[in-house]
Image: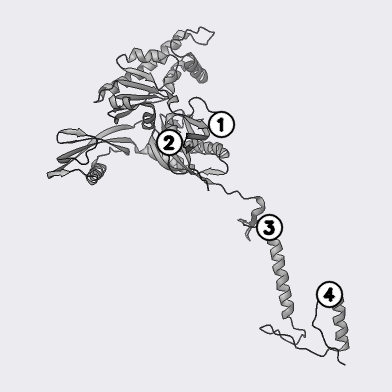
Amino acid sequence: MATNNYIVAIEIGSSKISCAVGIQTYSGINILAYASEPVNGFVSKGVVRNVDETGNCLNSLINRLEPSLDNLTIEKAYVAFGGLSMHTRKSTVVRTFDEYTKVTQSVIEQMALENDQQFAVPDGYQRIMVLPLESRLNGETSLTPMGIPTRRIECNYQNILLREQYMKQLEESFAMSNICILDSYNAIILEANILLSDTERSSGAALVNIGAETTTVAIYTNNLLRKLVVIPIGSNNITRDLCAEQIPYKEAEQLKIFKGYNSTDDDNSIIETELVNQIISARMSEILLNVKHQIEEAENRVANIVFTGGGSKLKNIMQIIQECLPNFKTRIANEESYSYNCAEELSLGSSAITPALYGLLLNGKENCCNEFIQTTPEQFQTDLFGDPVVTDKAPDNQVAEKEKEKEEKTENNEDKTPKSGNEKAPETPKPPKKQKPSKVFRWFNELIDNVTNDEEDTISEKE
């Protein structure tokens, strides 16, 4: 068996599914294998739409990864996902006491269980995570209420919800590819833990992931998640608007990436640079104004906005961000803030290992791979019905042993065979009785000795 914990991380994105295999070492994460494939419509807005095609894509990724893992097979994985309809909803549990009572761990656990039982999950939704918020007791808020005497305690929770059918479709796709999901994580939460500094999460910050088809907003204050919402527009809206100008999709995607916003490159392009700038500005402004609206609706003050995702990598995108969000301190996430090592034969792009993949590799605990025991064709034999049977020994050895056993049985049978046809073989072996042979019989024995060289008992020659 493998001596190291091989962690398999899979991220379900709006534009591609990415998979990485790594080992946790004292010097950091060591990436052993990586592969990704575009979703081509079977995953839309982060949601699995076609279960069969998603399962086939996962199988293809596994088949590409396993040859780099030295006779290991991938059987389990940690999964990061996002997707449309995901959002948070706050809940509160209150408990009163007849007299001042010290809050214990048991009280906190009982109130968390009460929240699980009493929280009304909307029809068609599934609660995928519960995060504790501040508690209020004695007229004050506290992050650590244990040990405080009180007559009333109010515990608040953040419940993360997702459409139940979306989760079922995701799990069914993994079941088709025979991959067990060890644990599933919200991608934006993994990214926030890596890309937001402690100061930003404490003072108030929003992490905005501009993906291909969705934009996810996670708002933090006092190191706690206050709001999570998915906006159903992304950078692909820019590409579609460029396609409306009679431009093929691939060329429109290249225009978006390589020209970017406010480009002054007047080359012989198939579309005017000014029109590209107008389209990028219009669609990105639409996304950013939606982000601003979600932040302003939050109950907590936000001073910093950090952008990540493919849409945040467009050229000169900070110019549009500063124009649309002048009252916030904004920046593009520095994805070099987390480091990892790669195998020598593995060549990765600058953004191949996303923050969500890195977070999965960092948080994974259980080994996801098992050793593959390979058998050679010579080790296969068939039974009476022609079905293959794997044996531990090679066929040549088996034939030799069978022949040896056959010879031993033959010798034993010869010892048990009576010398006279009228006599019956005894049930238990007994020493043969000596007889006085005739001359013909002696001559016959001598002839047999010369031919077979068998040893016979000495017969006394008495006439």
Q: Of circles 3 and 4, which is in front?
A: 4
Q: Earlier in the sequence, mark 3 or mark 4?
A: 3
Q: Earlier in the sequence, mark 3 or mark 2?
A: 2
- Mark nearer the viewer, 3 or 1: 1
Label 4: which secondary element: loop
Would you identify the image quadrant in which residue 151 lies? top left
According to the image, label 1 marks what residue?
346
Report the disc number at residue 395. Answer: 3
Q: What is the C-alpha distance between the residues marked 3 and 4? A: 32 Å
Q: Is residue 224 left or right of residue 455?
A: left
**Numbered circles on residues, count:** 4
In the foreground, 124 or 418: 418
Residue located at (46% from left, 29% from top): 339
Report how far apart the C-alphas of labels 3 and 1 lie in the structure: 41 Å
Most foreground residue, 184 or 353: 353
Label 1 residue SS: loop
Which amino acid type is shown beneath numbered disc 4? Answer: Asn
The mark lying in front, picked from 3 and 2, is 2
- Residue receiving disc 2: 362
Can residue 235 be seen at all in this image of the molecule?
Answer: no
Three-letter code for the amino acid on which mark 1 is drawn: Leu
Identify which amino acid the numbered label 3 is placed on.
Pro
Question: Callout 4 environment at 10 Å: few (<14), some (14 to 19), or many (20+)?
Answer: few
Marker disc for residue 453: 4
